[in-house]
Image: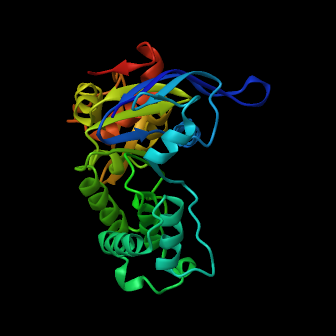
Amino acid sequence: MTITIEGLIKEYHKGVQALKGVDLVIEKGMFGLLGPNGAGKTTLMRILATLMDLTKGSVKIGGLDIKKDRSKIRELLGYLPQNFSTFSKLKTWEFLDYSALLAGLKNKKIRRTAIEKMLETVGLYDARNRHANKLSGGMKRRLGIAQALIGDPKLLIIDEPTTGLDPAERLRFRNLMSKMSLKDIIIILSTHIVGDISSSCNRMAILNNGRVAYEGSPDDLISKTRGHVWTIQAQDAELSVLKEKFSVVSSAPTTDGYEVQVVGNDISGFEGIPVEPNIEHAYVYFLEHSSENSVHEKVI
């Protein structure tokens, strides 16, 4: 199955555009959508989940047109929104039972087997009789994944899944998603946390101000940033100048000033040591310079 997005525009009140001509091709596996808050990620996710209408352009999911085939597309997808909530009176297994019914699992015996298997998969079997609204933040996100997966979807859409999670829960989530991505499924992971993408996605896009700044692999993104990252030894007076002229990724105090990592096209007027970029450097660079090179930097 393939998702093809062409010329996607979403306009709100008074012509304000959240998406400004998005073109993307998403295939089987885990696809990361990275961008700052307000970039348009949630709008795109809600359109793909058939919860919001597009204004212009086209979206096809497995050959189905999102304007004409909404009910068929809904049969294919599971969705975990950014603000996932449960019912206060339902236990964990009861909430998942309700979700399974909505997903079309009508046979009680088959549904119960599927629920127990899913609770094991997401590590919630021992908490199955706990009220869902009493789970920890990490457990609730795992329950959210479970309700999205219970119908065996071909498309899984996950919006900002690790916001607010501690490092252990974030790692657990990444491992679970990596395992799920080995199946015959498309997983779209939308986030502003760079580490969520670099550790699990083999294809990605950066969305900035409603446009695609980059589409390709994380490795290709990093390679395009080589020659644009430096470490500069700076005195106190120079630090503010560096922050005005460059995108500063980090600054650490030293015995005689600061060690500052910057990204940019050049560092004229300063002496620096070239640095091998990582995905965080690359992300900052493309956000700052995406408008300079035809906005959409696509790598096949």
Q: Would residue 228 appear left or right of 100 to someone viewing this image?
A: left
Tell me: residue 72, above or below residue 3. below
Q: Would residue 179 appear left or right of 39 to someone viewing this image?
A: left
At 54% from the left edge and 55% from the top edge, which residue is drawn? 82
The residue furthest front is 107
**Total number of numbered labels?**
0
Camera-side residue: 278 or 234? 278
Camera-side residue: 246 or 47? 47
Q: Quadrant of residue 26?
A: top left
Quadrant containing the N terminus in the rendered view: top left
Tell me: residue 226, above or below residue 238. above
Instruction: Where is residue 4? Give x, y as percent.
Output: 42, 26
At 57% from the left edge and 77% from the top edge, which residue is drawn? 133
Q: In which quarter of the image is residue 222?
A: top left
Residue 88 can be seen, yes or no = yes
For the rendered model, the colour scheme is rainbow
Tell me: residue 216, above or below residue 184. above
Camera-side residue: 140 or 119? 119
Tell me: residue 92, above or below residue 7. below
Camera-side residue: 11 or 120? 120
Instruction: Where is residue 115? Give x, y as percent.
Output: 39, 72
The residue furthest right is 14
Residue 165 can be seen, yes or no = no
Quadrant containing the C terminus in the rendered view: top left
Instruction: Where is residue 226? Give x, y as percent.
Output: 23, 27
Instruction: Where is residue 145? Give x, y as percent.
Output: 42, 61
At 45% from the left edge and 58% from the top edge, which residue is drawn? 148
